[in-house]
Image (cartoon, rainbow, N blue to C red):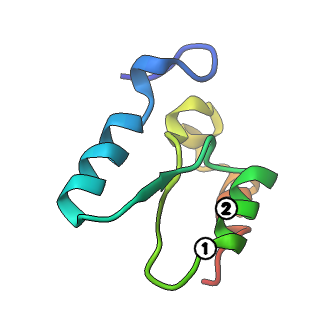
């Protein structure tokens, strides 16, 4: 499914992060969003071996349009 007007709890990746944490037997940090300052802070504070899951990109209409600006925001906190 796709959220119609921004984030909706039923589309959150929270349950996925919890299950991944169980499977990996380590903490999986769920970022509160997939872009932005909070995500950058979490990524910057991560240590080697930490697992971070970004919140659902489907909360953004730009995700379906492959907009270059949105892609740049997604990639911004990472070394690619």
- On the image, the x and y values in percent for residue 6 come to 63, 21
**What residue is at 32 percent from the left and 44 percent from the top?**
18
Label number found at residue 23: none
- On the image, the x and y values in percent for residue 63 come to 57, 42
| Residue 55 in view, yes or no | yes
Question: Which residue is at the far top?
Answer: 4
Question: Which residue is at the far right?
Answer: 37
Tell which of 19 and 1 is nearer to you: 19
- On the image, the x and y values in percent for residue 72 come to 72, 63
| Residue 36 in view, yes or no | no
**SS at circle 1:** loop
Report whether 12 appears left or right of 36: left
Q: Is residue 59 above or below residue 71?
A: above
Q: Quadrant of residue 4?
A: top right
Image quarter where the C terminus lies is bottom right
The residue under label 2 is 42
Report whether 46 appears left or right of 18: right
Tags 1 and 2 in contact by the CB under 8 Å rule?
Answer: yes
Q: Is residue 76 above or below residue 67?
A: below
The residue under label 1 is 46
């Amino acid at each position: 499914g796709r959220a119609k007007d921004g984030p909706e709890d039923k589309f959150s990746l929270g349950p996925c992060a919890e299950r991944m944490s169980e499977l990996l037997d380590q903490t999986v940090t769920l970022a509160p969003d997939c872009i932005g300052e909070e995500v950058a802070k979490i990524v910057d504070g991560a240590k080697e071996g930490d697992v971070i899951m970004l919140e659902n990109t489907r909360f953004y209409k730009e995700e379906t349009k492959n907009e270059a600006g949105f892609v740049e925001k997604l990639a911004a906190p990472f070394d690619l």
